[in-house]
Each structure stands twice: as structure tokens, then as C-alpha cells.
Image (spheres, rainbow, N blue to C red):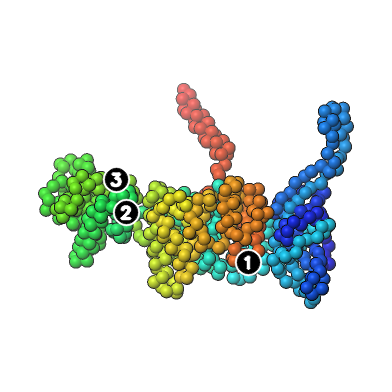
Amino acid sequence: MDLDRVALGYISESPRPQVSRVNSSTPLPVGEYVCADFRVKNRSSGDTESYTAVAVVSNSGYRMSIQPGTASYSDESRMAKLGSIDLPKYSPIDIYIVANLKRNKDGSYTVETPRYPIPPNTPIYPAPKEILELVYSIDSTKGIKLGHLAERRDVEVYVDVDKLSKHLLIAGATGSGKSNTVAIIADRLASLGAPVVIFDVHGEYGNLESMNRDRVRVEHIEAAINPLDIEPRILASMIIREAAATRQRRMLRMALSNVVNRVFEEARRERKDLKKAISDLFKEEGKKQKTKPLTDLSKQGSSGSEDEGENKLSAEEMFRDLILRELDQDYIKNLFESKKIESVKDKVEEFFEYAPVSLDAKRIRSFIEPGKIVVVDVSEMSDDQKAWILKLLSDDLLNDLKARKGEGTPTVLVVEEAPVFISIHENTPAKESLQKFAREGRKFGAILVIVSQRPRDLDINVVSQLQNFIFLKMVQSEDVQTIMNIADSLEESLAETIPSLPTGRAIVLGEWVGRFPVLVDIDMHKGKKMGTSPAILELWRAALDRRMRSTEDVEELDVP
């Protein structure tokens, strides 16, 4: 290959085809792409074959070529002299060979997995753009731009969106750039027409805006629980969480089923909305029982009349009281102990007091449209409530796509803080649903993106379904070892770069990026403002300035 090049160093040894060690006069930055030209004699054919190895610097050090003796360090006068001498030094460098390009007789290249080690004393040089593009040759018309090669802004990296049916894992420590990566992928997928749902656990995407507003809409939803839109069996499990409380859940399920059926029957028969049906049933029950509502008397009017109390109650509170009254019915009392009944009533009251319950809440599925990002904010919920909402959402999405028999619009579900829901250590309401979503979803267009800062805690039954990966900086050795087990194509010498990756730089692997791993600087999403660390010093100074100005204004007012 006739190219102007400068030798950056020379191969000192190649313990295996994918790893070589280089000696250089100065260190090279980790992540820099280099090439090496070498020849190998094929012993089968007798031909001499020419190769160009494409590699990335995976480690870099600095050493003195000649070590001064111990006596030299103890002699101050000698040390002074040594300080004025430029001692010989060199840089030992490790490189990971990504691919070999075999040169054909017609001058073209065949890209291969490394099979031959690079011979010692072979020079390495900066990788030319045209060589790198041969290795990473995703058609830009079939994919989205993720960023550019590390240290090489002239080489853009695209990923094949058709391969996202194999799902995606994004892993990285806090501050490594996970949420920015999610924003870039979500925005660019939506610009192609994808419906994207981000399950926002910490409210990081609260002010996400699209960088392509002409094509992409972003809608933010505060998730709420609509008891009329959830199966009584599931709602009973949400209210009574204890695994052993099977009889209590059965009791509540019976009461919920009767109340919900009556509400829908009343609405259908009288052609009224559900809230009006609840209100009318509540009044009717109050007249039958001739009792005060089972709510705090402080909510009633000054006269303490029932009608005034009813007018103060929301539809959600009336629905709660219908459930409580149903639990006092004879068929319940004949089947269950009074102590258990009272315990269930306490749990119902607690649930409606603390859970985000709203009869106006729509199913998240109703917000989903092509070219739209739906951010589902569950940051105000407990972990258990988040898990139930995620279960309902993932089941709903998968069932809808199944019902369309593969003709629905493929939908992307992004799950932040995945270990909360699919932990290897415990079961959650969402765990089985996400396993099913990942296992069956690829056949119907359900695409799962899992985001985690602790991959070592992820359930293997879900992770085994993920075949595309983005690995950002991680410092815990257990996490690095875990992702090597998950992505068996991640070679150890390349994985060793993960603890030293700068923010926003990632190792990307999987079918969606082609045969070879790539080190990428992820593009910055300009419409994502949250999720970054606050400018603490700037905020402190601004607050102090405001306080000082306020104090000066008060002093001026006090002057006689």
C-alpha cells in the first residue's frame, strides 16, 4: 500500500493473532487506531500473502531504557547530575488487532478475522481513513449515526437498525454517558419513524427535546395507576405485595372484580362516563347502608351531612370506599376471618393514600406513534410500583404487536436502571414480563434496550437475549468480567480499556455494527440537559450573589 506514513513504533512480540506488543519512543493514546503491513507464507499453497492489520491501542506505558543503580539515588550530587541528563526511555504499548485485510491480486481487499500474528519488528502507522472504512462499512442509508471512531472525527460510525431486533444492552458507570447515548439512539431512531418509549426511572429525561423537531415529537407522561384499567388479579397483587398473603389477595380480587363489574355495567346501562357511574354507585350504596362514608370526617362540610361529604370526595376516593364497603359484604365475611378483612382494608386505604392513583390515566400504549418519543416518568413511585407499571407496559406493547401479527410498527422500549427490575438476586413483577418481551419480541417487532450501571446484577435469562452492546466506562472488575461473559466476542485485551475510557467513549459490538468491535466517541445530544452533574461552583456563586443583592436592598430600605 503506497501511502505516506510515519512509523509510530515497532512490533516487539505477538503472543497471539489478536494481540501484539509495540515499542515506541513515546506513548500513544489508548483508543488510537493504527495499522501494520506484513506478509505471511501460506504453507498449504506456497504463496506469499500480504496483509494489513487494523488495530487499536489498548494500553500504553512509559519506561526508562537504562535503570540507574540504587547508589545513584542515594548520592545527592550524582542525582543533581542525573537530573540534567536526558536518560533513554521508551513506551511499551499493547494493541488489539480488530481485523486483517488480505490484499488480493486485483488490488482489492478481503476483510478477515485475525488469523496470523504480526511479525516482530513490523512498523505500525496511523490508520488511513479508507482502510478503516473498509472494516466498518455499515450502509448509512440502512442505519443511524452513533458517533465517530475514537480519536478519528473523519470516520463516522453507523449502526444497522434492522439488527436491533436482537435487542441492545447499554452498560456504564455513573457519569459515563449512558443517558446521552440513550437520547442519541432514541432521537435518531424516531427520526426514521420508530415509536420509542423511555421508562424514565430517575426523571433524567424530564426536559428531553428532539434535535430534529420537524420529524420527531417528544411527549412526557407522569405515570399513574388507573384501577379501572388493570385486571383485578394484578391490582390485588399491587395492593397486597406480601408473597404469602394468597388468601388476602383472593379476597381483594373478589371484591375488586365485583366493584369494577358494577361500575362498567352502570356506565353501559345508563350511558354515562365511568366517574359518573362511580359517583352514582357511591351515593346509592350510602343510601342503602344509611351510614357515613368510610372517609375522614374532616372532608365533610360543616354540617357533617353525607351529601356535603360526597361533594368533597374525588372519584378515586369514592372508588376506594366502594371497595371498602364491598369488603364488608356478607359473602366476604362468610369466607374470611374478620382479622384478615380488616388487614386488607388497611392495605387498600394505604394504597390509595400513597400510590399515584388516577382514573384519568390513559394506557401508555395510547400515546405511542411513529416518529415519537414517549418519556414515561416514574421517578415519584416506589420501586415496587415502578416494577408493576413496567410489567403492564411491556405486556401491553408485546400483546399489541402480537395481535397485529407482525404487521404493527416495530416499537423500542428503553428500560433505565434495569437491575431494579431484572435483578439476578430477586424476582420482581416486571422480571418475567421482560424475559418474555426479549424472548418473543424479536418475532413481532418488539425491541428492548436495557440500560445498567451494574451489569453484574442483571438476570442472565434476559441478558442472554441481548446481542448488541454498548460498553462505556466501568471501573468495577466484576462488571468488566460480567460483560466479557455476556459478549463472548469482547476480547480481554480490549476489555482492559474499559476502566480508562473517557466520558462518552464506548466499545460497540454486535451484529448492528458488523463483524468487528469498534471504539466510538458517541455524539453529544444537544437536546438532553438533564442527567449531567450540576455546575456546583457556578450555582453556589449565583445563590450567594442573589443573597447579597437581597441584603443590600433591605439595608437601603432601612436608611432613614
Cβ atoms at labels 1 and 3 below 8 Å apart: no
Q: Is residue 99 above or below residue 428?
A: below
In the displayed orientation, state which residue is furthest to the front: 44
Q: Position of residue 226 (x, y in %)?
A: 32, 56
Whether residue 6 sits left or right of residue 204 in the image: it is: right
Going by the numbered disc 3, the residue's amino acid type is Glu
Q: Can residue 441 be seen in this snapshot?
A: yes
Front residue of 44 and 52: 44
Tell me the mark number nearer the camera, choosing from 1 and 3.
1
Work out how far the residue at label 2 is from the one at label 3, CA to CA, in angstroms: 14 Å
Whether residue 119 sits left or right of residue 204 in the image: it is: right
In the displayed orientation, state which residue is furthest to the top: 560
Q: Residues within 10 Å of mark 2 (few under 14, many from 20)?
A: many
Q: In the figure, residue 103 lies in which quadrant?
A: bottom right
Going by the numbered disc 2, the residue's amino acid type is Ser
> Please, what secondary structure does the residue beneath circle 2 have?
helix
Chain-order first, disc 1 or disc 2: 2
Work out how far the residue at label 1 is from the one at label 2, CA to CA, in angstroms: 44 Å
Q: Identify the residue under disc 2.
A: 237
Cβ atoms at labels 2 and 3 below 8 Å apart: no
Going by the numbered disc 1, the residue's amino acid type is Gly
Chain-order first, disc 1 or disc 3: 3
Front residue of 278 and 549: 278
Cβ atoms at labels 1 and 2 below 8 Å apart: no
Q: Can residue 195 be seen in this snapshot?
A: no
Q: Position of residue 87 (x, y in %)?
A: 86, 40
> Please, what secondary structure does the residue beneath circle 3 have?
helix
Q: Position of residue 535 (x, y in %)?
A: 57, 42
Q: Identify the residue under disc 1.
A: 514
In the displayed orientation, state which residue is furthest to the bottom: 106
Q: Identify the residue under disc 3.
A: 350
Seen at 50% across and 57% down, the residue is 460
